[in-house]
Image (spheres, rainbow, N blue to C red):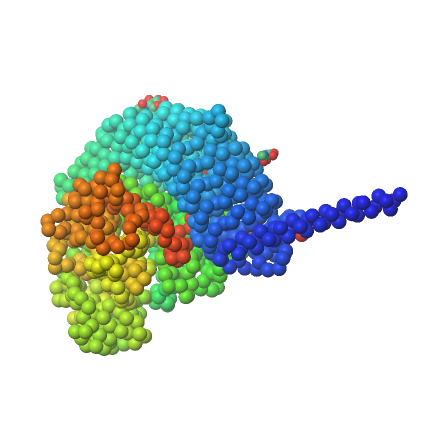
């Protein structure tokens, strides 16, 4: 009898083994097919058992349960085969920008999935409805992709979802809520996070979305196109700690119920059209960061209830028609740091009292009616700005507080010897040269944005890396050139330990770690280009794409203005003074023919004799043009490199200090869409700049080519994209930020592949190319391209470049000079546009040489974008990075394969998120997901 029983038992055991073996074979086949469809190199996927140490794979009971392939340069599409991995619990393919195409609907077959993380890839198309059948899903992060279309209502079926992050996509339509038959987000009672910011969501915020059943702590809807009023029901979600509705078109009154939200620390309602009485937020006692700026509230005196918000650290109430005086009680709030009240009508005497907060850093009252300022004997480290107040304008006072310049936020320089790094390397805070992993860190909860002192956060990140055994030497955070109070943004550099650059594997691990931290953090991390390495050419090009940030009257403009204005001012003053000051190049003896370059990193100093040789004694044959600056010669270096040498004529020469400043500025700027400086010559009364030679000449000339040679439509788009990327870099990633001031077709060069390179940037007066046929006014720039806003206000912002870029776009369409026979191209187009007609009825003025076959795909969008750039008022214009995103979309619609070409620069724009200082117990994120069983990327698969 015993045997009889035993045999079937054995048999069934064998069957079981067989079944398991078949499943793993199937998993193997799926993974093989996935890796075949991705061109990326996945290390170590060898043999036929994925559970044997395969990179990024974890198994349980011989089945694949998690895939984690972050930031390893995968390109291609995600195949529907993924749906066959029936035991998959967690899928993370974040930061593979080259991973494009739609998210396959088969994703809905992964019934056991609890965590889906596809941050910062290049996914396009709609989010498939099938996502709503992932019943066990708890964590869904699809942020920073190019998803379009509506938010699938089916997401409402994910009853266990706690984290929903769809931010920074192109999603449109309204926010779905349930109705009799369809599900909606209001059903997600376990959700803690709704991150839907930086999309194109429209319609009203549905009142039904919020109820007392919700347990949300974060509602982030900022930078969308939402309209209507803030629903009264928001006040029912008392668990909320962070509410961001900024940069929408919300109107109506602020509901009284908001005062119930006693745990909210960050409330951002700025840049909307809210009206009615200024809300009385008495009772919201947790508030730390309050921004009500730029709304249409009724005129009001300075609200007294503000002084009762005892935890307030930052108050932003710019442009709100506030009048009366500021009670000094306000400044006695114990932790108050920043008070920004610009563009109001506040008057009287500014008196911060004696009992002011010791944390105070900034009081910005630009453009008010302050008449007097009671200075305290022992001025703390407070930056007070009273520019454009009667106290300054009517008295002509030149006190520090009357300028809005030099807001000092730069870190103390480290005391390293700069000279020791090779040109493309960067010096770490610990004085080591290397190629850091770079990116941008932004805060979701602005109250954690500490723009004066980044030490804590640096230390925290360092600890995280160390505890993960990552070979990190140091972390450096610097305030990025964007408006700190709009972007809450730092640039980050992570330096390798004991080597000059991170291995691919360690970069991937860093990305993974930062991605993991994102799930319990108040920070957003956008990686820059971290494919830096000794062999990379564009090692410092960061093209983080930041959408929907630029808003009017913001301190961004002021900071830029401050930097630019200060710079220009200094230039002018210096130029007026003696030109013959001591040689700034110090020990570089200009009479020596081969000087070292002890102080400057990148550009090489050439002697006059050398240049003479390279240009064949400035021969006629090598004379390739001239401009206001002087003549341009072609030359060949001994290395064979062809260069363009700009030789300043007498009137264009600058003082030695200016010339040095110019070179230092130019040498810090590296981007594939910017003409790069190779070197210079400063000797024998000569000033010459040596640039890389760009073979196809200027865009201006290219637009004159006829038919067969003429630029096709897609080439024009590509040129526009390149120029836009170059400019975006100057505005957002150069340090200090650079406003070009003279964008025109003459300053856009084309290389042999028609990649655009922006040239002639820099702020120097004299270096600007004054064409003979254009008048240059005191306000720098070229007629026809000049921003009217800048012209009238004399206030220079990066939006002036955006305007000029708009003109350039029209030039690309029409091949006409901006002003031709007394006609201004902008006016002509504006008056001709008829949106009901094909090509907006612009046939007459379209360049007949766009012989592109016929269709001008995306033409209307291009015109729309140009008109956005040409808006009268700078604040209404998009930022250059928004322009970049738009043009990228157009190129995709023309079917131009952007990916292969743009990976180099946009792989740099991954986004992910990193955690908040976890010791801050009172923070909304501090207790979430901490210690969640996040799989380790490198741990071996479990024994089976
Ligand atoms: C949701 O989570 C609860 C608690 O973790 C669990 O018991 C339940 O099975 C989950 N439901 C689904 C559909 O996964
Ligand atoms: C507000 O925060 C406190 C402290 O974190 C917590 O105990 C309380 O439950 C919160 N209130 C609500 C309504 O969630
Ligand atoms: C604001 O609201 C509080 C509490 O509701 C009230 O006591 C106070 O008078 C109000 N202040 C103003 C200026 O309306
Ligand atoms: C204010 O901040 C302190 C210290 O961070 C905290 O203990 C307290 O609970 C906060 N008050 C409110 C009302 O949130
Ligand atoms: C920054 O903060 C750290 C820690 O809080 C402190 O030790 C350091 O002195 C601060 N640095 C500056 C420049 O204020």
Residue 821 position in % (x across, y down): 10, 51
Residue depicted at x 42% and y 34% = 219
Residue 812 makes an appearance in the image:
yes
Q: Foreground residue, 636 or 651? A: 636
Residue depicted at x 33% and y 37% = 247
Q: Foreground residue, 582 or 259? A: 259
Q: Residue furthest right?
A: 1
Q: Quadrant of the N terminus?
A: top right
Q: Residue furthest left?
A: 822
Residue 543 position in % (x across, y down): 36, 53
Residue depicted at x 26% and y 57% = 711
- Left or right relative to 410: residue 494: right
Residue 603 sits above or below residue 16 on the image: below
Q: Foreground residue, 835 or 734? A: 835
Residue 758 sits above or below residue 795 on the image: below
Residue 800 position in % (x across, y down): 22, 48
Instruction: Say which quarter of the image contains residue 2.
Output: top right
């Amino acid at each position: 009898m015993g045997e009889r029983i035993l045999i079937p038992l054995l048999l069934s055991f064998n069957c079981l083994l067989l079944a398991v073996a078949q499943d793993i074979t199937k998993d193997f086949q799926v993974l093989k097919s996935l890796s075949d469809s991705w061109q990326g190199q996945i290390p170590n996927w060898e043999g036929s058992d994925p559970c044997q140490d395969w990179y990024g794979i974890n198994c349980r009971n011989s089945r694949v349960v998690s895939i984690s392939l972050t930031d390893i340069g995968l390109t291609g599409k995600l195949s529907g085969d993924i749906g066959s991995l029936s035991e998959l619990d967690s899928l993370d393919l974040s930061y593979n920008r080259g991973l494009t195409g739609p998210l396959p609907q088969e994703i809905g077959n992964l019934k056991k999935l609890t965590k889906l993380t596809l941050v910062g890839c290049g996914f396009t198309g709609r989010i498939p409805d099938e996502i709503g059948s992932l019943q066990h899903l708890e964590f869904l992060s699809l942020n920073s992709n190019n998803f379009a279309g509506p938010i699938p209502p089916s997401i409402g079926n994910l009853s266990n979802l706690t984290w929903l992050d769809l931010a920074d996509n192109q999603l449109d339509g309204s926010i779905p809520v349930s109705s009799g038959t369809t599900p909606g987000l209001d059903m997600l009672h376990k959700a803690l996070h709704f991150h839907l910011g930086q999309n194109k969501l429209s319609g009203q915020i549905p009142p039904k979305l919020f109820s007392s059943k919700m347990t949300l702590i974060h509602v982030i809807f900022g930078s969308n196109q939402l309209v209507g009023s803030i629903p009264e029901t928001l006040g029912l979600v008392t668990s909320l700690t962070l509410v961001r509705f900024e940069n929408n078109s919300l109107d109506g009154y602020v509901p009284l119920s908001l005062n119930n939200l006693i745990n909210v620390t960050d409330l951002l309602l700025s840049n909307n059209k809210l009206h009615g009485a200024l809300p009385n937020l008495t009772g919201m006692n947790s508030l730390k960061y309050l921004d009500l700026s730029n709304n249409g509230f009724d005129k009001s005196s300075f609200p007294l209830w503000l002084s009762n918000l005892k935890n307030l650290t930052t108050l932003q109430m710019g442009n709100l028609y506030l009048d009366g005086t500021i009670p000094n009680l306000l400044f006695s709030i114990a932790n108050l740091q920043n008070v920004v009240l610009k563009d109001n009508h506040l008057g009287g005497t500014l008196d911060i009292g004696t009992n002011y907060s010791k944390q105070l850093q900034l009081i910005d009252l630009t453009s008010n009616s302050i008449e007097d300022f009671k200075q305290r004997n022992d001025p703390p480290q407070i930056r007070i700005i009273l520019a454009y107040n009667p106290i300054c304008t009517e008295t002509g006072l030149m006190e520090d507080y009357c300028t809005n310049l030099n807001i000092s936020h730069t870190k103390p320089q480290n005391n390293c010897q700069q000279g020791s790094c090779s040109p493309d390397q960067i010096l770490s805070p610990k004085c080591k040269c290397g190629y850091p992993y770079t990116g941008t860190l932004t805060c979701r909860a602005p109250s954690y944005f500490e723009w004066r002192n980044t030490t804590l956060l640096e230390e925290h990140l360092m600890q995280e890396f160390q505890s993960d055994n990552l070979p990190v030497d140091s972390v450096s955070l610097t305030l990025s050139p964007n408006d700190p109070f709009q972007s809450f943004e730092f640039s980050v550099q992570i330096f390798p330990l004991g080597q000059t650059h991170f291995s691919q594997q360690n970069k991937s691990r860093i990305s993974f770690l930062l991605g993991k931290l994102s799930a319990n953090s108040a920070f957003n991390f956008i990686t820059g280009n971290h494919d830096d390495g000794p062999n990379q050419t564009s090692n410092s090009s960061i093209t983080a794409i930041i959408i929907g940030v630029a808003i009017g009257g913001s301190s961004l403009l002021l900071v830029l203005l401050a930097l630019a204005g200060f710079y220009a001012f200094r230039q002018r003053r210096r130029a007026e003074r003696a030109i013959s000051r001591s040689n700034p190049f110090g020990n570089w003896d200009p009479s020596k023919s081969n000087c070292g370059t002890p102080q400057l990193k990148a550009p090489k100093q050439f002697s006059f004799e050398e240049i003479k040789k390279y240009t064949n004694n400035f021969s006629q044959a090598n004379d390739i043009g001239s401009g206001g600056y002087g003549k341009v010669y072609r030359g060949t270096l001994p290395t064979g490199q062809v260069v363009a040498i700009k030789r300043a004529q007498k009137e264009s020469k600058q003082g030695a200090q200016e010339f040095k400043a110019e070179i230092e500025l130019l040498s810090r700027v590296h981007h594939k869409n910017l003409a790069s400086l190779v070197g210079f010559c400063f000797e024998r009364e000569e000033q010459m700049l040596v640039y890389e030679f760009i073979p196809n000449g200027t865009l201006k000339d290219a637009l004159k080519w006829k038919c067969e040679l003429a630029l096709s439509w897609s080439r024009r788009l590509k040129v526009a994209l390149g120029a836009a990327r170059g400019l975006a870099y100057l505005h957002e990633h150069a340090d200090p930020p650079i406003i070009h001031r003279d964008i025109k077709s003459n300053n856009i060069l084309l290389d042999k592949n028609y990649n655009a390179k922006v040239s002639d940037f820099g702020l120097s007066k004299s270096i600007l190319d004054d064409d003979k046929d254009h008048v240059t006014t005191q306000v720098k720039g070229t007629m026809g391209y000049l921003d009217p806003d800048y012209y009238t206000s004399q206030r220079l912002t990066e939006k002036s470049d955006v305007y000029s870029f708009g003109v350039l776009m029209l030039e690309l369409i029409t091949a006409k000079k901006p002003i031709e026979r007394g006609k201004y191209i902008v006016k002509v187009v504006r008056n001709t546009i008829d949106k009901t007609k094909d090509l907006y009825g612009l046939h007459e003025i379209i360049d007949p040489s766009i012989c592109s076959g016929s269709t001008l795909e995306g033409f209307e969008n291009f015109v729309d974008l140009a008109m956005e750039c040409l808006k009268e008022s700078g604040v209404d214009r998009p930022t250059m990075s928004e322009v970049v995103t738009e043009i990228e979309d157009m190129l995709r619609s023309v079917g131009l394969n952007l990916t292969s070409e743009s990976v180099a620069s946009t792989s740099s724009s991954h986004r992910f998120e990193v955690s908040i200082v976890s010791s801050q117990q009172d923070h909304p994120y501090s207790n979430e997901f901490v210690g969640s069983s996040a799989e380790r990327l490198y741990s071996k698969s479990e024994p089976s």
